[in-house]
């Protein structure tokens, strides 16, 4: 058996690459079709099958390097999560449940782990009794360490960044990978030490090499023992004791070789001190290895060293006592042994520069727009949408609201209409009423309200369904635990689903706020329904509903040209028309921005910029910031126009307020005019409220549609979680049942042994008796009485019942009758039924 360790492969299973990639391209790349990448998908499947086929041969290094290189390029085209579930079983327990992640970086990390495992197994398979075998083993172990170092430094940060902090990968973690890296370095350094011993190097140099071997083993042990959370359970049972035994072995070997150097230099006192220290270290390492059951080869190595050290201790002490009489310093006073490191991580060039190992077929998905570039386009569209909403739409709406508020406060234009047209309807009101009438205003609002209510109920039902799934899973988990099933590695549902429950609370809060907003809109509709419905009346009925006044500005004493009220009324009308022109100009700005945003597509420009970059560069959205800023700058002119529009409106509103004050002070109050003015104002406000309610309901529809898609994804996530928990519970139950069956099988020989012991008691009680066991039947043999005692002995059954013809049956307490034994069970079942009925 070899005295060095090799890392086992992580076992994986077939994954649906074709389905996941096709669905991702179909949903995220509208400019192409999955059929255009059939060869790429097939080549990916072929590469993975070859890379995960197993086998220990040097040719498989190239296969794994090629697949890793393709994964590096694939991750420039796709995000880590494309919906592809990737399972890998623990390296040291291939029959256990695999750890499954929807993460392509996890696939890359596992491939690198298996590459390191392959290197370690190649190194372990070398014949280290020859110089060439040692040279090859050193190279392979250093390659394994380099691969693990590359995995730790370049891939694990990406993996941890792309996974949830609450659910990190269990096995591929920093401490676990780092401990394996130091183990590979220790074994490479050990081979260097072995070559130095084989070539009869000086004892001082061999001691330095051995000290570094012990240091590497110690670093591996430290990363295992000091890790939080602990990773010791991830290793095979004998691995950590193996590394500890090796650590003490080479600490002792370093002291022993240094003692030989002291002997050559006539430092006999230091020689004894180092031999004594070496003896303590070797004995400690031997005790660890013997108690922990490490490989016999390892135990034999350290036992041989211990024997040699003990012989040298006896020899050195005898010589010093009889001849040299030098003082023996304490171990703490001895100079430390300088370490010489000859092993270091060797990273394969195919990892540092993946494009050199792609092969003749080239990269796959080379024509697909990279994920970083596509993400930059999405970022641009989000920025554009947010900019248009905040800088254009919101500002325009704010200016419109300010205008509407000023007109309502000043009772314009109703006050002017009441004066200028004592009878009939103002043209502006006729136009507004016609607009509402053509749109069937009240029916439209009622339809909107019903649709919004239906959407709200649908959204609420989606959230309820998601929580029902979680509740059902929690009930199943509780029922499983109530059956007494031990589940040591399974979190209770209340802990496992905390993230989903917290997200549900956030969604519920948003939904409650939306319901409050819906209630406000419905209340607004109830308040203005009658006035808005009045706008849909025929023009004759609407005109008849408005009071008439007899005031005629043309006949109000004196010349009409010099009438101050008429002058102020004309000025107010002019200001209102100018404000209306500004409002139309704002609407035109918003329309032009919408048309530009709808046709604005920077895909071609980003794709051109991405194609100019290095093909193997992991393109990030930040690389396109200059392009995004330049493209967004074309919208700045609209913001400038809107700011100028707002400044003009502010000046006109100030003039409107001043002129209105003069208008009010110049006119005489007339009850008929006032009544007509209020009626016209009410209808004008009803029109604006109609527009406001329609806008609110349209926003509500959009909100619920978007929220429905979000909650559908949340419900699917809850279902996936519940399905995974059920699968986990089923697997754990099967594992526990299998363990119970194996325990039952293990107890069967014990029952037979107890029967044998009962059969052996009588003959063994006689002096000189002996027992022989043949197969599974025990036969008692006495030296002087060979047959008769055996005939009087009858083996007891497993329930310890007497033989059929024994008198013990008359006095023996029998078990209860079957009907009595079943009665409590029937009672409990009825109780459960009663509870369900209640």
Image (cartoon, helix red, strand yellow):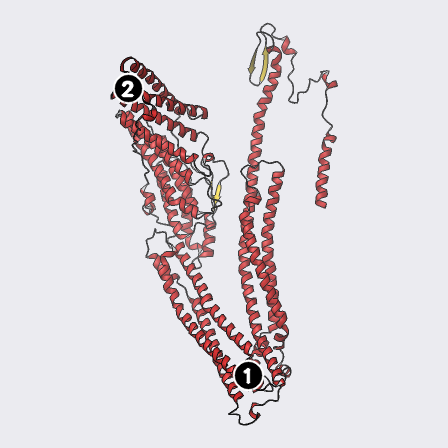
Task: Reply above or below: 567 against 277.
Answer: below
Q: Earlier in the sequence, mark 1 or mark 2?
A: 2
Residue at 29 percent across and 32 percent down: it is 340
- Residue 664's label in the rendered image is 1
Residue at 52 percent across and 82 percent down: it is 661
* Quadrant in the rendering for residue 635: bottom left
Q: Is residue 117 visible?
A: no
Q: Which residue is mark 2?
A: 268
In this rendered view, identify the residue nearer to me: 645 or 124.
645
- SS state under label 2: helix
Check disc 2: other Cα within 10 Å, few if <14, some if 14-19, many if 20+. Answer: many
* Quadrant in the rendering for residue 109: top left
The extreme bottom residue here reads 558
In this rendered view, identify the residue nearer to me: 799 or 245.
245
Check disc 1: other Cα within 10 Å, few if <14, some if 14-19, many if 20+. Answer: some
| Residue 40 % position (x, y) | 40, 50
């Amino acid at each position: 058996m070899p005295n060095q360790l090799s890392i086992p492969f992580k076992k994986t299973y077939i994954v649906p690459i074709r389905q996941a990639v096709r669905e991702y391209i179909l949903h995220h790349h509208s400019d192409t079709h999955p059929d255009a990448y059939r060869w790429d998908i097939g080549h990916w499947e072929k590469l993975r099958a070859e890379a995960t086929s197993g086998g220990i041969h040097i040719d498989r290094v190239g296969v794994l390097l090629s697949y890793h290189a393709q994964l590096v390029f694939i991750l420039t085209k796709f995000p880590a999560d494309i919906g592809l579930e990737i399972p890998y079983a623990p390296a040291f327990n291939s029959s256990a449940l695999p750890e499954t992640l929807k993460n392509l970086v996890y696939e890359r990390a596992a491939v690198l782990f298996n590459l390191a495992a392959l290197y370690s197994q190649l190194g372990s398979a070398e014949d280290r009794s020859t110089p060439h075998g040692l040279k090859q083993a050193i190279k392979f172990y250093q390659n394994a360490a380099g691969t693990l170092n590359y995995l730790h430094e370049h891939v694990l940060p990406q993996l941890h960044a792309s996974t949830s902090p609450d659910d990190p990968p269990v096995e591929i973690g920093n401490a676990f990978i780092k401990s394996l890296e130091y183990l590979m370095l220790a074994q490479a350094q050990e081979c260097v030490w072995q070559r130095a011993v084989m070539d009869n190097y000086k004892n001082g140099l061999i001691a330095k090499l051995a000290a570094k071997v012990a240091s590497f083993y110690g670093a591996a042990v430290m990363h295992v023992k000091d890790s939080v959370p602990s990773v010791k359970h991830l290793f095979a049972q004998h691995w950590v004791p193996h590394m500890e035994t090796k650590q003490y072995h080479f600490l002792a070997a370093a002291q022993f070789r240094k003692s030989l150097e002291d002997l050559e230099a006539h430092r006999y006192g230091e020689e004894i001190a180092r031999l004594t220290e070496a003896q303590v270290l070797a004995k400690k390492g031997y005790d660890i290895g013997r108690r922990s059951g490490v490989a016999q080869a390892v135990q034999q190595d350290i036992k041989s060293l211990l024997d040699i050290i003990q012989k040298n201790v006896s020899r050195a002490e005898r010589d010093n006592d009889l001849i040299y009489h030098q003082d023996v310093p304490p171990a703490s006073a001895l100079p430390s042994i300088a370490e010489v490191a000859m092993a270091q991580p060797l990273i394969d060039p195919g990892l540092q520069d993946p494009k050199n190992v792609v092969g003749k077929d080239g990269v796959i998905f080379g024509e697909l727009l990279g994920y970083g570039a596509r993400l930059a386009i999405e970022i641009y569209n989000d920025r554009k949408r947010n900019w248009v909403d905040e800088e254009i739409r919101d500002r325009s709406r704010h200016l419109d609201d300010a205008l509407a508020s000023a007109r309502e406060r000043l009772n314009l234009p109703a006050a002017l209409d009441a004066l200028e047209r004592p009878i009939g309807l103002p043209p502006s009101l006729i136009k507004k009423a016609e607009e509402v009438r053509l749109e069937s205003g009240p029916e439209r609002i009622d339809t909107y309200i019903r649709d919004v209510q239906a959407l709200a109920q649908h959204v609420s039902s989606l959230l309820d369904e998601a929580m029902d799934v979680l509740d059902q899973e929690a009930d199943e988990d509780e029922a499983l635990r109530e059956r007494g099933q031990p589940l040591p590695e399974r979190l209770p549902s209340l802990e496992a689903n905390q993230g989903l429950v917290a997200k549900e609370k956030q969604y519920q809060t948003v939904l409650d706020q939306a319901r409050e907003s819906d209630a406000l809109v419905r209340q607004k509709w109830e308040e203005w329904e009658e006035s808005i419905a009045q706008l849909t009346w025929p023009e004759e009925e609407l005109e008849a509903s408005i009071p008439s006044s007899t005031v005629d500005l043309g006949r109000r004493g004196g010349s009409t040209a010099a009438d101050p009220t008429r002058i102020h009324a004309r000025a107010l009308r002019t200001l209102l028309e100018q404000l209306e022109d500004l409002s139309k100009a704002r609407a035109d700005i918003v329309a032009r921005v919408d048309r530009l945003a709808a046709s604005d597509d920077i895909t071609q420009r980003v794709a051109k910029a991405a194609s100019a970059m290095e093909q193997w560069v992991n393109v990030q959205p930040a690389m396109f910031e200059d392009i995004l800023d330049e493209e967004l700058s074309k919208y700045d002119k609209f913001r400038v126009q809107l700011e100028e529009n707002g400044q003009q409106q502010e000046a006109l509103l100030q003039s409107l307020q001043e002129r209105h004050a003069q208008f009010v002070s110049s006119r005489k109050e007339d009850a008929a005019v006032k009544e007509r003015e209020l009626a016209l104002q009410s209808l004008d406000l009803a029109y604006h409220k109609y527009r406001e309610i329609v806008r609110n309901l349209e926003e509500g529809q959009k909100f619920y549609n978007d929220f429905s898609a979000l909650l559908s994804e949340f419900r699917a996530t809850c279902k996936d979680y519940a399905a995974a928990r059920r699968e986990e519970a089923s697997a754990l139950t099967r594992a526990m049942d299998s363990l119970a069956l194996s325990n039952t099988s293990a107890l069967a020989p014990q029952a037979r042994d107890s029967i044998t012991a009962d059969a052996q008691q009588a003959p063994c009680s006689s002096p000189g008796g002996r027992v022989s066991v043949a197969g599974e039947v025990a036969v008692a043999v006495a030296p002087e009485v060979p047959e008769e005692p055996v005939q009087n002995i009858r083996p007891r059954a497993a329930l310890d019942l007497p033989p059929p013809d024994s008198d013990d049956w008359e006095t023996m307490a029998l078990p209860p009758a079957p009907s009595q034994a079943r009665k409590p069970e029937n009672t409990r079942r009825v109780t459960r039924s009663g509870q369900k009925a209640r």
